[in-house]
Amino acid sequence: MHASPTSNPPTAHLRIHQYRTLAPGPRVIVLGAVHGNETCGTRAIERLVQALDSGAQTLARGQLTLVPVTNPLAYQRQQRNGERNLNRNLLPNASPQDYEDRIANVLCPLLAEHDVLLDLHSFQSQGEPFVMLGPVDNTGDLEPFAQAAQEQALALRLGPRRIVEGWLQTYAVGVQRRLERTAPGDRAHLLSTDPCYGIGTTETMRRHGGYALTLECGQHQDPQAPEVAWQAIQRTLAHLQLIDQPAPAPTPAVEFLRLTEVVDRLHAGDSFARPWSSYDRVQAGQTIGTRHDGTPVCAPQDGFIVFPNANAVAGNEWFYFAQPSTRSLGG
Ligand SMILES: [Zn+2]
């Protein structure tokens, strides 16, 4: 039995599988393992490469690009980051400082050659899969966008019933608070207080005129997560007609939430009141955690805990707070 082709990828290059059909259509790119310990997308992409290469599945039109391991160093180390988080401050850099800067110099131009991105992730705590949706159409400075309808339509067809919006806007407010709170220091500080730090794969796609979704397929070890990823790819290909399959119907009864606040961990002694999972409900005033000096951190309103990270490095995101979104997703 031979080893899985991506069991120990070299870190000096990105392996990119590209399928250009002979008929016009959308240019779609799918990423796995932007975070090295999130391998559900890698498994789903390997399965698809095998299906396409063997002829078990055929593309009808358009172009499909598959990157099974987007951060090889992090993947090899079986951890989230190589030298830093690839999904932050994802910008071309003429004088790259670290491994992820060098990946960005390859990945950003690659993304710019595409119309649609599906970025496959998993998460640390228990919970069900969810889709991260971009902003409404707008001409603002932070994240101007004109393809919300197309992005929403795809979000409603990936499979998972839970959809979340408001990430970059909420993140930008968090960065502002961080700037006000701390004095300039090392590079980690510079990065975490740079508004561009919020730019990841999906933001890069939208900046280049495309649209993009992040799919969080389940807990890192959940054996179902690769299947969630696989189904989402298949549904994307059918929705965009890269494969001749019936267009998937929109997911009924979605739960659509908006991130409204990010709270940083400020000290290694800051601790949660209980081991939170994403989307645990909290009531206004309920204690979420306690600062190292005993000050309680309470829910500002009725809502949900999202992305709790009990081990967050001091000065970085501890958890997000979400409430039901009032935006219409169409159908
Ligand atoms: Zn991730």
Image: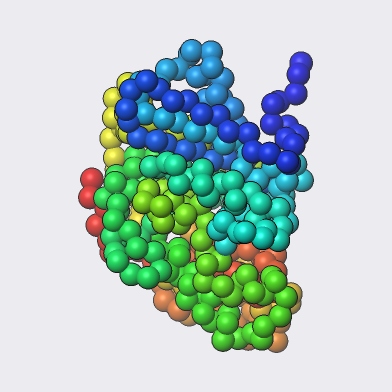
Horizontal side, residue 326 vs residue 233: left or right: left
Q: Nearer the viewer, residue 128 or 220?
A: 220
Q: Quadrant of the C terminus?
A: top left
Picture coordinates of residue 130 (x, y %)?
45, 49
Q: Quadrant of the N terminus?
A: top right
- Relative to residue 49, is residue 82 depicted above or below? below
Horizontal side, residue 68 vs residue 154: left or right: right
Horizontal side, residue 263 vs residue 325: left or right: right
Quarter of the image where one finds residue 115 = top left
Residue placed at 35% from the left, 56% from the top? Answer: 256
Picture coordinates of residue 311 (x, y %)?
70, 65
Horizontal side, residue 330 vs residue 307: left or right: left
Residue placed at 29% from the left, 25% from the top? Answer: 246
- Relative to residue 135, is residue 49 depicted above or below? above
Judged from this view, the residue extending furthest toward the front is 94
Picture coordinates of residue 258 (x, y %)?
39, 64
Residue placed at 41% from the left, 30% from the top? Answer: 63
Q: Nearer the viewer, residue 167 or 106?
A: 106
Q: Nearer the viewer, residue 251 or 207?
A: 207
Residue placed at 60% from the left, 51% from the top? Answer: 105
Residue 223 can be seen, yes or no: no
Picture coordinates of residue 193 (x, y %)?
59, 75
Judged from this view, the residue extending furthest toward the top is 55
* Colouring method of the image: rainbow
- Count the labels in the image: 0
Residue 175 can be seen, yes or no: yes
Quarter of the image where one finds residue 164 = bottom left
- Relative to residue 109, is residue 169 depicted above or below? below
